[in-house]
Image (cartoon, rainbow, N blue to C red):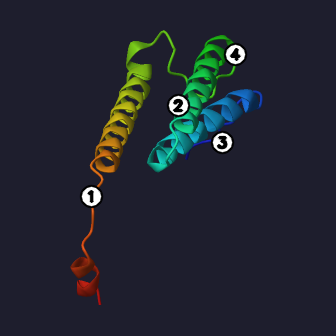
Amino acid sequence: MLGEARAAEMPKLDIPGAVLVCAGVMAALYGLTALDSDGTVRPVLSFVVSAILLGSFYLWERRTPAPLVRMFSPDVHGSSGYRAAFLSAAGLVVCFAALSLSQTRKEVQTSPNDESVIP
């Protein structure tokens, strides 16, 4: 039988890191959803705020003793999964933004006959 294993001390929570990353991701998502609106200032401002918040998260995680995500560890194999997940998510966000912009720029017009087909 295995004995009970507990950490010597309770790990500290990284509340500032969690707040920074959540606010940064929410600002980026708001910018993506605001791309369909008429003005272009809100999405750009939202992306700037998101970049500032996520950059602050990056700097915070590098210097905090108990980081939320250990993607900056000296162990190459331990942090490569986080890097791959980040790059994959960034690629998906870029694809989503490009498709969203291309669909809104086409200005597809519907004809009156299109509405009569819907039951």
Residue 30 appears in view = yes
- The residue singled out by tag 3 in the image is 4
In the rendered image, the quadrant that contains the C terminus is: bottom left
Q: Earlier in the sequence, mark 1 or mark 4?
A: 4
Q: Residue at x 66, y 42 (%)?
A: 4
Residue count near mark 1 (Cα–Cα under 10 Å), binned few <14, some 14–19, many ≥20? few
User: Which SS class for mark 2?
Assistant: helix
Q: How many marks?
A: 4
Q: CA distance from mark 3 to mark 2?
A: 52 Å
Q: CA distance from mark 2 to mark 1?
A: 24 Å
Residue 12 appears in view = no
Q: Amino acid at mark 3?
A: Glu
> Residue 71: x percent and y percent?
50, 21
- The residue singled out by tag 1 in the image is 108
Q: CA distance from mark 1 to mark 3?
A: 64 Å
- The residue singled out by tag 2 in the image is 44
Residue count near mark 2 (Cα–Cα under 10 Å), binned few <14, some 14–19, many ≥20? some
Q: Is 111 on the left or on the right of 63, as rendered?
A: left
Q: Quadrant of residue 90?
A: top left
Q: Earlier in the sequence, mark 4 or mark 3?
A: 3
User: Which SS class for mark 3?
Assistant: loop
Q: CA distance from mark 4 to mark 3?
A: 29 Å
Circle 4 or circle 3, nearest the eye: 4
Q: CA distance from mark 4 to mark 2?
A: 30 Å
Report the disc number at residue 64: 4
> Residue 21: x percent and y percent?
61, 32
Q: Nearer the viewer, residue 109 or 73?
A: 109
Q: Residue at x 55, y 47 (%)?
A: 1
Q: Amino acid at mark 4?
A: Thr
Q: Earlier in the sequence, mark 3 or mark 2?
A: 3
Q: Amino acid at mark 1?
A: Val
